[in-house]
Amino acid sequence: MNWSIYLPKYAIPWLFLSCATLGTEGEGDRNLPSAGVGPFRKLDGDELLGVPPFVFADSFAHYREPSALSLSETEPDVALYAVALKRTSTTEHDVFVRSRAYDGRSFYGSEGDSGHAPAVVLEPTLPWEADHIASPSALSYKGEVWLYYATPAGIALATSSDGLTFKKRDNPIFVRDAAVTWETDEPHAPSVALFPDGTLHLFYGSGGAIGEAISSDGVTFSRLDGDSSTAAIDPVLTPATDIAPSQLAAGQKPPFDTLRVDHPAALPRTTAAERLHVRVLYTGYRSGEGGTASAIGFAARYGDRGRLIRNNAPVFSVDKHEEAPTFFTWDGGAFLYVHHDAGPSSAPYPAVAGAFAPANGRLQKPLVFSDRP
């Protein structure tokens, strides 16, 4: 394992104080598919240059809905695409920005990085975008960065040769199908992953559930059935069944995702036993005494299609309206990013927080912010 990273212009130490493995990554596929990811622990003040656990924050821009694009298999070098609020003297609307952290934590243009701002890479300009874009999902594909995103008209696509300047397709590439009864709103919150066989799989939210579609070119997608025992096309993940308090065993917590599931983040891998392991983080919602609560869940399966099996416990939960997970792995572990409440409780705003697995691993304090977005 490589215990240091070299950053352009700077040599910055990076170290586990405890070298634990990430779940069961090296043990083949003896366990349930929903084992082997997380749990994640939030980053602390010794591991960040900013206010913990936030890695990408701005009280004016409201960074949220991150998408991580790993730039190295051996180092935690990552580009982060996120939604930001762009304000003028008369209007405000959401745009996409890009930042970068060579260490997975010190993002260019975050609070504390004086004089820098992340690059604005996409704005709503087309009539069917209706001045609203959301939920970017970045993918390295065919030597380019392909950026899938949500609009009121469905899921759209823009592509870039450098990851900074994007060209949009003229129309959405994936829209609601009236014949799919559970799709009660436009598909949104896309997560697109490249599978070992060269196909692209789109995981998306609609109707409080998560669906899946497949493509050979990244543009034309066909829905996959989550349950082949029925005639209809079913989602691959639905909310958990609620359990009455009287039916909970001693020490058992109620399900965290009984209201709806949304914001999938897919990351397939091939196990040591050479089986396809499809891993999906997601946001699970439930009704609570103070309103809707959320936590980050994990579901997975072996094979390229079929229903996902959920882990009964969340992999990340801090009770701060955490949503929209994205994660990446490298030789040293895994980073998870979500947005959740920052600032005072009287006036919270969204910011991107960082978490790490293995939970007993430690990172040394970073020395500098990245020098480019």
Image (cartoon, rainbow, N blue to C red):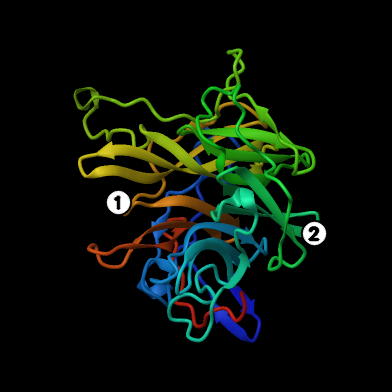
The label number, if any, that marks residue 143 in the structure image: 2
Query: Which amino acid, by three-letter code, is at mark 1?
Result: Asp
Residue 229 shows up from this direction? yes
Q: In what element is the residue under mark 1?
A: loop
Coordinates of residue 131 in the picture (x, y in percent): 55, 56
Dot 2 and dot 1 residues touching (CB under 8 Å): no
Crowd band around label 1 with a 10 angstrom C-alpha radius: few (<14), some (14–19), many (20+): few
Task: Identify the element where label 2 is drawn.
Answer: loop
In the rendered image, residue 262, in percent from the top left (x then y), is placed at: 47, 40
Amino acid type, label 2: Gly
Q: In the image, what residue occupies the spot 43% across and 53% down?
A: 40
Which quarter of the figure is the N terminus placed in? bottom right
User: Crowding near pointer 2: few (<14 within 10 Å), some, many (20+)?
Assistant: few
Which residue is at the front of the view, 84 or 91? Answer: 91
* Residue at (58, 56) in percent of width and height: 329
Q: Is residue 277 left or right of residue 167?
A: left
- How far from the left and from the top, in percent, is residue 28? 61, 39
**For residue 240, above or below residue 47:** above
